[in-house]
Image: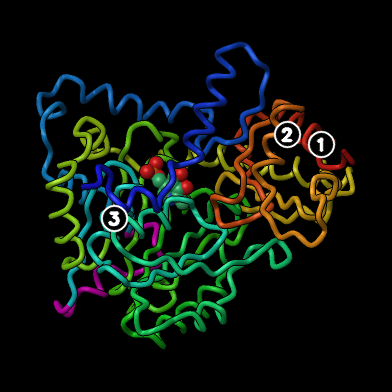
Amino acid sequence: MKVYANRTQEINESVTLRLNQKAQKLKDKGTQIYNLTAGQLPFKPDVSFVNSIKNQLNFLQSYQYSPTGGFEQLHRNLFSYMKIKYDFNFDKFSQNGKFKFKLFVSGGAKQVIFNFLGAVINPGDEVIILAPYWLSYPSMVKIWGGKPKIISRDIVDGFIPDLNEVENSITEKTKLIIINSPNNPTGIHYSKKWMERFADLMNEYPNLLCLSDEIYRDLYYFDPKPVYHYEIDSSLFARTMIVNGISKSFACTGLRVGFGLADEKIVNRVLKIQSHSSSGPNSLVQRSLINYDFEQVEKFLVDVNSHLRRNADIIKEVFKKKKLAKCWYQVNSAYYFMLDFSYTNVFKAIKKDHNSTDDLSKIICDKLLKEFGIIIVPGSDFGAPNCARVSIVLEHESFKEAMEKLTVFLNSKN
Ligand code: PLP
């Protein structure tokens, strides 16, 4: 009998977490490095939220199990906030009583997505994933026995998914499409026009479900703001699983709280999985959010977004100055920029065989670390060969230094 489960052979460890640990180890040894792997802000959360946590420290309930899907008072607070923020009339939608949606809380958006997928995927179901993608989607789909179907776009098209290609890939086995706007790893959000076309596509396939990963929803630094297909056509809400959480917009990746909202029948299945895997999420953090005024985060995000905008401008300035316009596109949201090596000297120098289609991103990223002390994440794990993800959260001065060095590296001919 085999010791290890076959499913573990199909998935890899999360490369971003591994590289982040590697960067930390090098730093601890005193090596000067620029860690551009992070999917988290280098700031503490807003003081109002820290105080809210402190206020809950004296309560016994903060240390005890919460209900599996989180505290109901928290659902209420979250929901009132969503009613203000979303361009969607939740009450009107459920008024006829035919449809009931439900919120739940999990240990981070990652767990929300994992459990949503577990609630709807049957073995053999196809799940459409738009590349470059957040690297956990394909692994999660495989763990639940589904088949990822990858639709790719590259820098020439600004990494904007082609919905005609998506449509052509739909078969009778297609259960679900995952969208992620604002996007990790490309740092863009899709336009209203794209969402309108996506809404049309969803309407053409009435059995298709959508998982909308909105973890970066509030992190955009150029207008217009992100919009979603169910805000354009509210009937699509019934087939959409919405994912969000506090990791990114509260600068709290370590606190592990995420939210999901969907049809009650889906959420009830999620809760079965959650009740046997992790139970309810962190009670202390949940309680600190029950009376929390989410408007405070809006204020916190003004500075965060202007910080990101400045770093996005630094990329533009440095890349243009170094005549790397072909590797540049305008990022407008989330924390990332996707670097395409294909048009660079360093790529041409490393690519010995002109006809080869091998992915060289890992080799190039290793060379960058060795020669310039810069860590970025190879694109192979994001479904983007010969690319790499650059995190743009660093303090401006270090970020500018890193971009100057990176562009020297990209232009080097050996
Ligand atoms: N979805 C995307 C697109 C992400 O980038 C991340 C984290 O990097 C997550 C989900 C998971 O977020 P959390 O830290 O809340 O689990």
Q: Which residue is drawn at 42% across and 65% down?
A: 148
Give the label on residue 368, or none.
2
> In this figure, what is the number of numbered marks?
3
State the residue position of label 3.
260
- Mark 2 neighbour density, 10 Å: few (under 14) some (14–19) many (20 or more): some
Give the label on residue 409, or none.
1
As for residue 50 lying within the magenta part, the answer is no
Q: Which residue is drawn at 44% across and 76% down?
A: 232
Mark 3: amino acid? Gly
142 and 174: which is toward the camera: 142
Q: Which residue is drawn at 77% across and 55% down?
A: 342
Pair 1/3: label in front = 1
Residue 360: x and y, percent?
69, 48
Residue 180: x and y, percent?
47, 59
Q: Of marks 1 and 2, which one's residue comes earlier in the chain? A: 2
- Spatial separation of the CA atoms under disc 1 and disc 3: 42 Å
Q: Magenta segment range?
A: 83-98
**Residue furthest out toward the top:** 30
Q: Do the residues labelled 1 and 2 touch (CB within 8 Å)?
A: yes
Quadrant that contains the C terminus: top right
Residue 261: x and y, percent?
27, 59
Label 1: which secondary element = helix
**Left of 325 or right of it: where is 46?**
left
**Left of 123 or right of it: where is 334?**
right
On screen, 337 above or below 52?
A: below
Q: Of marks 2 and 3, which one's residue comes earlier in the chain? A: 3
329 and 277: which is toward the camera: 277
**Left of 157 or right of it: where is 231?**
left
Mark 1: amino acid? Phe
Q: Of marks 1 and 3, which one's residue comes earlier in the chain? A: 3
Residue 165: x and y, percent?
56, 79
